[in-house]
Amino acid sequence: MSMRRGEAGYRSWVRNAWISVGLLASIVFLGNRLARRHSGWRVDLSEDQLYAPSEIGLGMVDSLQDVLLVKVYFTGEVKLGSVQIAKRRLIDQLDELVSASAGRMSLQFADPNGSSEARVEADRLGIPSVELSAMQGTSEVTQEIFLGMALYYRGREAVVPFVLPQYFEYAFLSELRRVLRDQPVGIGFLVGDGRGVAEDPFLEARALLARRYDCKDVLDLERGESIPEDVRVLIVADPTELHPRVVFAVDQFLQAGGRALLLLDRYEVDLTRGAMNGFDTGLGDLLRAWGIRLSEGLVWDQERSNTISTVESVDAGGRSLRGQGVRVQYPFWPHVDQRGLDDTLPVTRRLPGADLFWASALEVESSTQMESIQLLRTSELSWILPPEEAFRLDPKQLNARGVALLAAGDGQERNLALSLYGSYESPFAEGAPAVLDEYEEVLYAQARAQALAEGREVPERELARTSEDVASLLGETQVVVVGDADWARDGKFFTDRNKMFFENIVDWLALEDELVSLRSRVARERNIVDLLAQEREELGLFSLSLEESDDATISGLEETARRRATRRRWTWMLAATASSLVLGAVVGALVRGAMLRVPGGRLS
């Protein structure tokens, strides 16, 4: 009798539990539907908080003084499940901004897939269709997708060509920022020697900024011209033998409160030809006035570096490695990850990192007149090596050099990018340099070339002075100096990480702090730990595909690295398995205890 009572009590408990679960699910479902229809309140539970509107976004929308019309060019009938989800999230994000605008933002929807008129409008605005594919069952479905929008405000127009939910806020609000400005912010480009270049190697960098800024070339400074007054930020890219009058114009621009980004190189390296060209930037006096200087050699980062393919390169002896297909860690291409970024500034906070190529270190003098902040830095296992060693591409040579440097034990962190802030004494306080004299310039170039050919010290330039007024210690300025220019060049060097860092710097210098903060909300890069790479780095090895080596020391270190990595891998796997078993046992014990506490219940 007692057994039947126990079974009846257990069945009653189970039945009540299922009823409770059903009621709870119904309440959650109905509550969610009611909240979706009648409440704008949402919570973003994603780790990076990419889908909830930020305070910056809500503030920008709330500041609207007239009606902002947003014409949304979305594909109407979407066949791909992932795109359906993305489209729904984008509409929700737009609706939240509309709710925050208090009637000063309105939406209009157009389907370029279903309306020829809407397609013509999208083409005119530069809103492209993107062909996307997905597997549905056993077949692949492909569809032409539009996810763009246009903003209209007070006669001004801006376009977001294509956007995904995780990047919506930055893309939308950066364009909104653009149409809210009465006057565009000017960004000046001074490239090379400042006299114009036949082929600009920074076209991609310009294109990144052109959507939000008024980009223009700064020319003829050597002839006495000044930097235009509407330029807020000056980008000095790969300066080469700048005439003192150009440097003077840059100095006076900064003395008046202007801001600048300097991308500096001391060496041009061409691995395919095995050639290197060293040159002077012409900015030495200005750098000394700020209390910094470029290192004579190149940075070798033992711990954090990118890989290089030697398929189209040469080894240190000039022999072609074409066709070998070897990929090695190349310490002359430092990769700065989050450990090498300043985490207190919005310009570098949460950046995925940056990639530099044949960089010079920025050495800070003790007598610096300006406050300096490290933006990018190498690992502690870094050295300054002669630039000729950049042609070390053979894995055996790289590994041997790495082991030797590690044994020396004198590595240290190196500055790759610095932010300088404050006022400083002009290096031209004794008088402004005269404008360019073509005849004198030719004579100086000949004397310099002859000195280099004979191995003599380059003669100092004879500098004539003028009676112009020179501003010095006039006001505070901000300068960002990077010891490399290749990282911002067109092509493979201008990586996605570098593009984000470049935009952050310019926005920061242009006092567009809101854009910097918005860009930091993008999805973070989460790296998978490579145990073998870590062990190799610790031992000073670099090759990703070390074959059998005739060097017993290198072979022994490689075997040690593999053994250590295997041991760590098994340790982690066993720890994870043991943790799962312990957790399962605890949960099982709790369930068993709960069942035994049921009135009349028992477990057989």
Image (cartoon, rainbow, N blue to C red):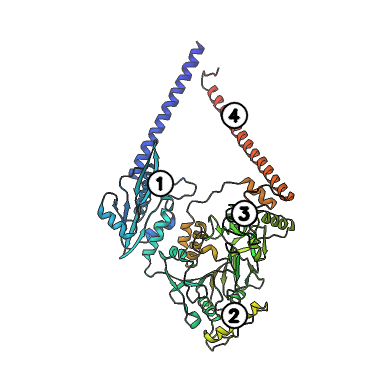
Q: Nearer the viewer, mark 3 or mark 1?
A: 3
Whole-Å distance between the Cαs marked 2 and 3? 41 Å
Against 512, residue 532 (above or below) is above
Disc 4 on helix, strand or loop? Answer: helix
Mark 2: give few (<14), some (14-19) or many (20+) Cα within 10 Å. many
Please tell me which of labels 2 and 3 falls first in the chain.
Answer: 3
Which residue does the numbered mark 2 point to in the structure image?
A: 427
186 or 66: nearer the viewer: 186
The nearer-to-camera label among 2 and 3 is 3
Residue type of the residue flagged with mark 2: Pro
The residue where tag 3 is placed is 329
As shown in the figure, which amino acid type bears the numbered disc 4?
Answer: Ala
Q: Whole-Å distance between the Cαs marked 3 and 4?
A: 45 Å
Q: Which residue is mark 4?
A: 585
Q: Which residue is drawn at the image coordinates 34% and 59% (left, top)? A: 126
Dot 2 falls on a residue whose secondary structure is loop
Q: Please, what secondary structure does the residue beneath circle 1 have?
A: loop
Q: Residue 603: where, in percent of width, then height?
A: 55, 19
Verify CB contact (< 8 Å) between mark 2 and mark 4: no
Residue occupying the point 39% across, 57% down: 172
Closer to the eye: label 2 or 1 = 2
Q: Residue furthest top?
A: 1
Residue type indicated by callout 3: Gln
